[in-house]
Image (tube, rainbow, N blue to C red):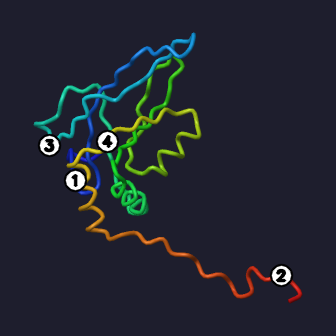
Amino acid sequence: MSENIKDPQQWLLQFDLETTIVTVGRWNTTRWSLVNLHLPKDKKTLSESAYSLPLMLFKDERTDYRFNLSSRDPHLFFIFEVEEDESLKPLQVTASQTGAASFMDGDYLVLSVPMPLPIQAWMEAYIGRHGELLETRKKKRKGAGRASGN
């Protein structure tokens, strides 16, 4: 990450993790929660949080960002690798539901939290600078989809 805590394409997010033992039927299981989400604006406002990850924005994910921002309650998605000792290793944070869903298919834990308003405004500015990403269909080649011999 660059020297900056926040710039037009990335913002360092700080947070803590909390565990709760939950009983499901006869079994006890650990439920992880992301707590104390902090959005430092510069080095002076860094906190003593246990974890830090940069939220990075990518031009090719603008459609996903717009979809998330247009939802009733936008979320951020934190992806963790579950270690052998059941601890969590933070991998990345994203505002793309599609990106987060790709990790859910593997052995990763994805935690979501409501997106803070300053992040929403920052992402809107990013989309404003780079424009909306419009999904365009490719032209079919001539004769595609026709049965042979017609």
Quadrant location, the N terminus: top left
**Residue located 29% across and 45% down the image:** 115
Q: Which residue is mark 2?
A: 147
Question: Furthest-right residue in view?
Answer: 149
Q: Secondary structure at mark 2?
A: loop
Q: Amino acid at mark 3?
A: Asp
Q: Residue at x 49, y 51 (%)?
A: 98
Q: Residues within 10 Å of mark 4 (few under 14, many from 20)?
A: few
Residue 111's x, y, as percent? 42, 35
Please name whichever residue, 26 or 112, is drawn nearer the observer in this view of the structure.
26
Q: Amino acid at mark 2?
A: Ala
Q: Where is residue 113 shown, x and y percent of the image?
A: 34, 38
Front disc: 3 or 2: 2
Of callouts 1 and 4, the N-terminal one: 1
Q: Residues within 10 Å of mark 2 (few under 14, many from 20)?
A: few
Q: Nearer the viewer, mark 4 or mark 3?
A: 4
Drawn side of residue 147 relative to residue 139, left or right: right
Q: Earlier in the sequence, mark 4 or mark 3?
A: 3
Instruction: Give the SS element for disc 4.
Output: strand
Circle number at residue 42: 3
| C-alpha gap between disc 2 and disc 4 | 50 Å
Per the rendering, the mark at residue 114 is 4
At which x and y percent is residue 70? Answer: 35, 58
How far, Cα to Cα, is label 2 from label 1?
54 Å
Query: How many residues crowd around disc 3 within 10 Å: few (fewer than 14), some, or many (20 or more)?
Result: some
Q: Which residue is mark 1?
A: 7
User: Tags 4 and 3 in contact by the CB under 8 Å rule?
Assistant: no
Q: Disc 3 to disc 1, how far (Cα)?
A: 10 Å
Q: Residue furthest left?
A: 44
